[in-house]
Image: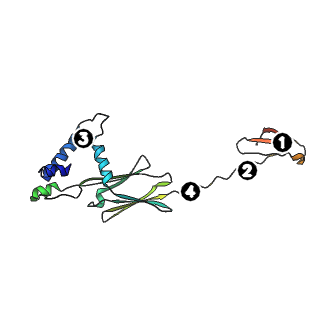
Amino acid sequence: MDLALRDLGFDPSMIGALHDMFDFMDETTEQKPQHPSRTYIRDTKAMKATLADVIEYPNAYQFVVDMPGLKPDQVKVHLEDENVLVVSGERKREKEKEEKEGIKYLRMERRFGKLLKKFVLPENANTDAISAAFQDGVLVVTVEKRPPPEPKKPKVIEVKLLGGGESSTTGGGGVQATEGGGQQVQDGIPGEVKTD
């Protein structure tokens, strides 16, 4: 839209004023539920324009996000819904400085506005161990992996002989027990396993 307005002869400061006016209108008026809001559209455009790489290491996930022209204090990293990593920032024009010093853009190709990226974290991501580093316009967020769960060992239940009689192992019968009230078979007759 910016390029179309520039082609029509609009001044970049006028384009900026139009953007601000539409942003203000979006914040003060309610949209019908079936139409996406301007904020949603702006966030979608910001997510498409924000470039990122996702790298998996044996013990961590790394998210490398390009955020050119921002300072570390302008970058925000947080979690939504306990498993969505959100990286955001906004690159603003210095309008007051431009107006004060009489600066006029002859060409404006670099992107201003919101930078946004959302990542759904895998189940094994440890959300308590997240770190972020920012250098030269590149943000690197590292999310450590949880160690894999140890396999459960089967619980062995001792089977005791009921009554005072002697035990016999002849005839191919026997006693088998499983965890949690399974079945026992004694000489081919099913019954309940009793644990004390």
Q: Between residues 66 and 161, which one lies in front from this camera angle?
A: 66
Crowd tier of the residue under label 1, counting other residues whose Cα lies within 10 Å: few below 14, some 14–19, many 20 or above: few
The residue to which callout 2 is attached is 156
Q: CA distance from mark 1 to mark 3?
A: 76 Å
Report the amino acid beneath label 2: Val
Give the structural element (helix, strand or loop) at label 4: loop
Crowd tier of the residue under label 4, counting other residues whose Cα lies within 10 Å: few below 14, some 14–19, many 20 or above: few
Which residue: 48% across, 55% down? 126
Q: CA distance from mark 1 to mark 4?
A: 40 Å
Mark positioned earlier in the residue sequence (2 or 4): 4
Q: CA distance from mark 2 to mark 1?
A: 18 Å
Which residue: 30% across, 66% down? 136
Mark nearer the viewer, 2 or 4: 4
Q: CA distance from mark 3 to mark 2?
A: 64 Å
Q: Position of residue 177 (x, y in %)?
A: 76, 45
The residue to which callout 3 is attached is 27
Give the quarter of the figure containing the C terminus: top right
Question: Is 145 above or below relative to 45?
Answer: below
Q: Position of residue 105 (x, y in %)?
A: 14, 58
Q: Position of residue 64 (x, y in %)?
A: 38, 60
Mark positioned earlier in the residue sequence (1 or 4): 4
Which residue: 28% across, 57% down? 74
The residue to which callout 4 is attached is 148
Question: Is 185 above or below relative to 64?
Answer: above
Mark positioned earlier in the residue sequence (2 or 1): 2
Which residue: 73% across, 41% down? 182
CB-based contact (under 8 Å), mark 1 and mark 4: no
